[in-house]
Image (cartoon, rainbow, N blue to C red):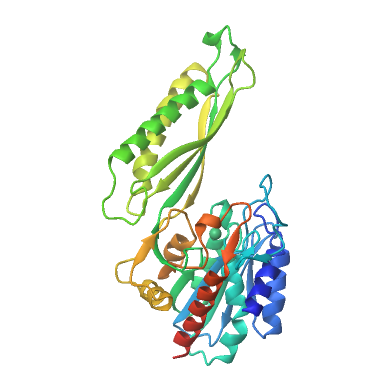
Amino acid sequence: MQNVKQMISRLVSFDTVSSKSNLDLISDVKAYLLQLGVQSHLVPNQDGSKANLYATIGPNVAGGVILSGHTDVVPVKDQDWSTDPFKVVEKDNRLYGRGTCDMKGFCAIVLALVPEMLSANLKRPIHIALSYDEELGCLGAPFMIKEMAKNLPPIDAVIVGEPTDMQVAEMHKGVYGMTIHVTGLEAHSSQTHLGVSATRYAAKIINFINDLHDELVANPYEGLPLLPNHSTLNVGIVKGGIADNIVARDCSFTCDYRVLPQEDYNIVVGKIDTYMAQLEAEMKAKHAECSITKDVIWTPGFAAPKQDVAKSLAMRLAGKNETIGVPYGTEAGQFQTDGGFSTIVCGPGSIDQAHKPNEFIELSQVELGIKFVRDLIAHQSS
Ligand SMILES: [Zn+2]
């Protein structure tokens, strides 16, 4: 336990808020592993300011299990912390600090147990996968996943250690994040006939999206472990116009579409796109340079098949005979679709404590996490 606590403090001490580089943490982990004789592979981002890391412990043969975590954390700015978020404080059987729960706790458990993995007689490997930019929409992991799929012998299972209270999560929604930009034509507000109002057209699209949302609500899926059991559309940010007396030239808004894994996002997105094309044509008829554009970040949802290696392995290791769904997104869908790996989500800590000031992980959860990885070591050694 002491080693694990030290490792949690060590990882938390790196300020790896997603807007910053994670390289200091990554090189520290790389040096730590190297000291133990384990080589790491780095998969950097385009400008080299961040990197994924993966490493193999045990024989490089088929049947490996990937333990996956992200190294970035959400911001602490404007949050009311009673302690330094990047210094772990132990109090009331809890470890406080940014990332203790989401999800440096899990990463630290895995890293602290590497010496035990090395001294065990592993017959099949345990691979460690650490990503960046998960909190920005799982932007970093796909590059690493593709490399792992190409370079590693066949994988049995991936365990994504996001906080589930050590329950086995077999389902979550995908996130189709849109930023829509409407460009109109400025005019004096007393001469609306000379302008094309971007806010007016944006409002039409937002109304259309809200109506689609209500249709989704009216058509839930029965029997899913997800709440709510339908997809959702939410316009989170709207920015438009610069003055009361100007017909707005620009308006942009974001729309977060949380998609059930059972649903094809193209159906809803197709309706939005068609409607926007129709509005754009209408705007262009008034002024040729008007436009409606859309940027997208897509993070796939995740649903484990009925019979699944990762699912049954995680249930056995965690001692559970049922599974849950989780409301948040993870990299699990990417491991499943980009890597073709059997994947499950299971890790220590509660999502209730994630992303909040005074984030913490219960020591009892850390203990369960340690037991889980130790049992995996035994499993890979038999
Ligand atoms: Zn997380």
Which quadrant of the rendered structure holds the N terminus? bottom right
Of 225 and 352, nearer the camera is 352
Q: Position of residue 360 (x, y in %)?
A: 60, 61
Image position of 282 (left or right of 151): left
Q: For residue 100, which quarter of the picture? A: bottom right
- Residue drawn 37% across the image and 72% down it: 320
Image position of 259 (left or right of 129): left
Res 359 seen here: yes
Image position of 271 (left or right of 42): left
Of 216 and 296, nearer the camera is 216
Furthest residue in direction top, as rendered: 190
Q: For residue 363, which quarter of the picture? A: bottom right
Q: Position of residue 225 (x, y in %)?
A: 34, 57
- Residue drawn 67% across the image and 85% down it: 36
- Residue drawn 36% across the image and 66% down it: 323
Q: Quadrant of ligand 1?
A: bottom right
Give the total number of marks visible in the rendering: 0
Q: Position of residue 245 (x, y in %)?
A: 62, 12
Q: Position of residue 296 (x, y in %)?
A: 50, 44
Q: Is residue 47 above or below residue 258?
A: below
Res 54 seen here: no
Q: Is residue 83 above or below residue 151?
A: above
- Residue drawn 49% across the image and 61% down it: 331
Which quadrant of the rendered structure holds the C terminus? bottom left
